[in-house]
Structure formats: structure tokens, C-alpha cells
Amino acid sequence: MTEVSEDLLIELREKCEKVQNLLEEESKRDPETEPYKSKYAAREILSDMKSCLTNLKDSVRSSDPLFEEIEAMYGSVLLLLGIVALETEELATGEEHLMNCLACMEDQSMHPKKVLIVLRALNQLGLLWSQRSDGTKSHGYLQQAEQLYNDYTDQVEEQPVDVYALFTSPDQTPAQTKGDSPLEKVHTLTLYYLAQVYGTLGNPLKSAVYCHNTLKRQLESKDYDMIEWALNSATLAQFFMEQNAFRQARHHLSAASYVLDKHDQELQTIECSEEELEAKKERLKHRGADVARCWAKYGIVLLSTSRDRLMEAEEGQSGDATPQRLRPPGELSGLQFSLLELSVYEDQVTDSFVLTYDDARTVFLNCQQWLGQAKLYYTLDDHASDHVRIIQDYSELYRNLVFFEDDEERQCKMHKRRVDLLEGVVKEL
């Protein structure tokens, strides 16, 4: 067995620590005039490490147990060089490093010291080809990453070693739970990228399923920005309502409201400067208004679709059954966040088609409340275009309620209310 100088291993470890600090900490403080200053400094160190590890590889036999460890270190350096190149807009160079990384890991991707290197490289290549607008090629790399994760978790019990940890002593590597393990975080990124790619490839249903799975994994790992998560869940709910999947839409809107309320509670006890706290509260108010608008849209779409369903039934097109075009796709069934107790939010409004005026009025009143909440933030003075769209939503809400009202006099009053709302905002513009 070949002996490797302890001094050399210590030198590599120190260089790796410096690279990690440059990329994860120092780069955040780079001046606007030199946005890649830290990344370029990291690249220089990585290039030195690559040369050193190349010489080491050449001096160790492939049958030597040490060879696999050196090769894993070498692959991690190629990976980091590739990532740095992509982040500094040197796409061709980044691709070359990443392809070389995969080549040196060939047929060994299931090794605990190499699997994360391969997964990260595949993710980066998927992201690169997505940026180049080649969804098919991007999908190919990301699908490989998804399959490798599934194979590894099915067949290997040992926790994989992350890129930087390859250069540290085993006793310096912190213990990991499943939620915060690098393997799970990397896989969540794979699913997130696949969600975007399926959308690009014209498969919105599959994109939605992958979006949901990404959000679910983020909840489980507790590794997410609460405001961003809530907004993504509410945005996904809008797609569900367009597919007439009202149960899933309501569930995802409820999850968004739950997470925002939880964030509001956390702000009551958070320790930060008054300026920072005000900024956080303003962001919550803004996004809370956006989620309220999504809730209102849910009610409007539910009323509109219920109206269409009843009209088709009256015309004898569908009998008592819901026509096929108004049924949610089977692929969307069962998309739930089992960790969250959401009944208090879901019980506000039905997820079933509305049949009577009383049912419609209940949805209408909820929508009025949500639009009122949205108007508190989107005022005419500060957000004129958004404020006008909210008034248009009020008008649309009344238009849908009219269908369920049998009394003509009350129908006229509702239409008059629509006119008054629209004329009122026109006068103020």
C-alpha cells in the first residue's frame, strides 16, 4: 500500500476549507465592481488541488485502497471547478469540468464517497442545459440523477460522504439526520429542476406533481424559506384550480396560509434589529395579500366552473354526472401534505361544486373577505394596477353569484353593484 504524506493531506484539507469559506461566505461580501472576486480566488486554489491530486493519482496503483479515496477527492475538485465556472458565466468550461468529473466516476457512482459528487454533477448539467433551452438534454441528466438516488437508497445503507467532508477526518464530520443529510437535499434539488423541465417540455401535470413533491420534501426537512414556500404552494394551487382539482387547490392554499401564520408567530419572538423586523413584517404583509388573492381566485373559479357544470346539465349534455372536461386529472389525486393539520383552513370553503344560491353565497362571502384583505396592501395610491385587478375580481365575483340567484330584482341589484364598483375605481384613477 502506498503511503501518502500526512503533510500533503493536511495541506489539501486546509485548501479545501479555504475554498469552502470563499464560496459560501466571502463571495456574499464581494463588491459590485468585482462580483466574482472570491470565486476566482477559489478557482485558483482548486486548480492547485487538481494538479496535486493528478500527481497523487499517477503515483498510486488503481488496486490500492487509497486510490478510490484520491479519485473521490479529484472528482470533487472537478465538480467544484465546474460549479465555479458556471457561476462565473464560463459555461463551456463548466461543462467540460463536469463531464470530466462524471468520466472519472464512471461505474463507481454507487460508492458512498462518490455518489454525491455524481448527483451534484448531474444536477449541474441538467441546470446548464435548461439554461441553454434544451429541455430534452436537461431532462436526460436529471432523470439519471433521480434514478441514481433511487438505486442508492434502495441498495446502500451507508450514508454518503459529502464533497467537502472527503478532505476532513471522519471524527470531524458532523452527525446527520435524514432531514438534513446532503443526499436528501441534493435529491430535493433534482426534483425541483425536473419540475421546471417538465413544464418546459409541455408536461404541466408531471411538472405539478414534481413541484408538490419538492414542497413536501422541504416541509419534511424543515429547510425552506417560509414566505417563498407559501407563495410556491399558492401558485401551484392556481394550476390545480385550472385543472378542476379543487381539493388539491384548497389543500395547497391552506398549507400556504398555515405556513404564513406560523411565520407571523415566529416574528413575535424573533431577535433582530427593529429595521430588519419591519422589513420582515412588510414582506409577510405583501405575500399574505398575494395568498389572499389566490384564495379569492379559488372561489371565483369554483363558482364559474360550478355554473358551467349546471348549464351543461340543464342543456342535457351531461345528465347528473360531471362532464369529463370538468373532472380533475387522476395524476393529481392524493397530493397532500400529511405533516400539516389544515382542517381549520380547509373548513372555510368547500372543495365541491356549488349547487344552490346559499352554497354560492357562502363562497362569495369568503371571497369578499379575501379580496378585502388583499386591498389593505394593494391600495389605489401605492399599487394602482393591482388594486384595479382586485376590483375587477369583485365584479367577476358578483357576475358568478348572479347565476345562482333566481329573483330578477336581486339579479339587477347585483349587476348594479358591479357597475358601481367599476365606475368608482375609474373615477379615482
Image (tube, rainbow, N blue to C red):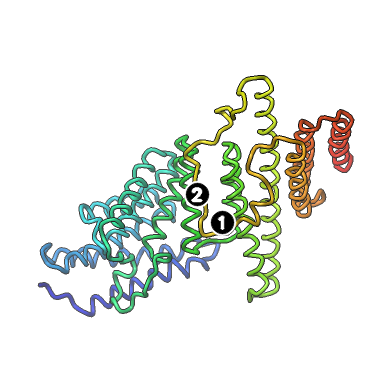
Of residues 408 and 19, which is closer to you in this image?
408
Q: Label 1 neighbourhood size at 10 Å, few (<14), some (14-19), many (20+)?
A: some
- Element type at marker 2? helix
Q: How many marks?
A: 2
Name the residue located 62 percent from the left edge and 24 percent from the top edge: 319
To which quarter of the image does residue 279 belong?
bottom right
Label 1 or label 2, whichever comes before in sequence order: 2
The reply, left or right, for residue 358 in relation to residue 337 is right
The reply, left or right, for residue 297 in relation to residue 36 is right
Measured from the top left, where is residue 380 in percent x and y? 81, 48
The reply, left or right, for residue 328 in relation to residue 158 is right
Q: Label 2 neighbourhood size at 10 Å, few (<14), some (14-19), many (20+)?
A: many
Kind of residue sitting beneath label 2: His
From this view, report whether residue 78 is shown above or below residue 239.
below
Measured from the top left, where is residue 420 in percent x and y? 88, 37
Q: Label 1, label 2: how many angstroms apart (C-alpha)?
A: 11 Å
Name the residue located 43 percent from the left edge and 65 percent from the top edge: 179
Measured from the top left, where is residue 409 in percent x and y? 89, 30
Of residues 54 and 137, which is closer to you in this image?
137
**Label 1: which residue?**
229
Labelled disc at residue 212: 2
From this view, report whether residue 356 is shown above or below residue 176.
above
Of residues 18 and 265, which is closer to you in this image?
265
Question: Contact (CB < 8 A) between labels 1 and 2?
Answer: no
To which quarter of the image does residue 6 belong?
bottom left
The reply, left or right, for residue 279 in relation to residue 38 is right
From this view, report whether residue 128 is shown above or below residue 111.
above
Kind of residue sitting beneath label 1: Trp
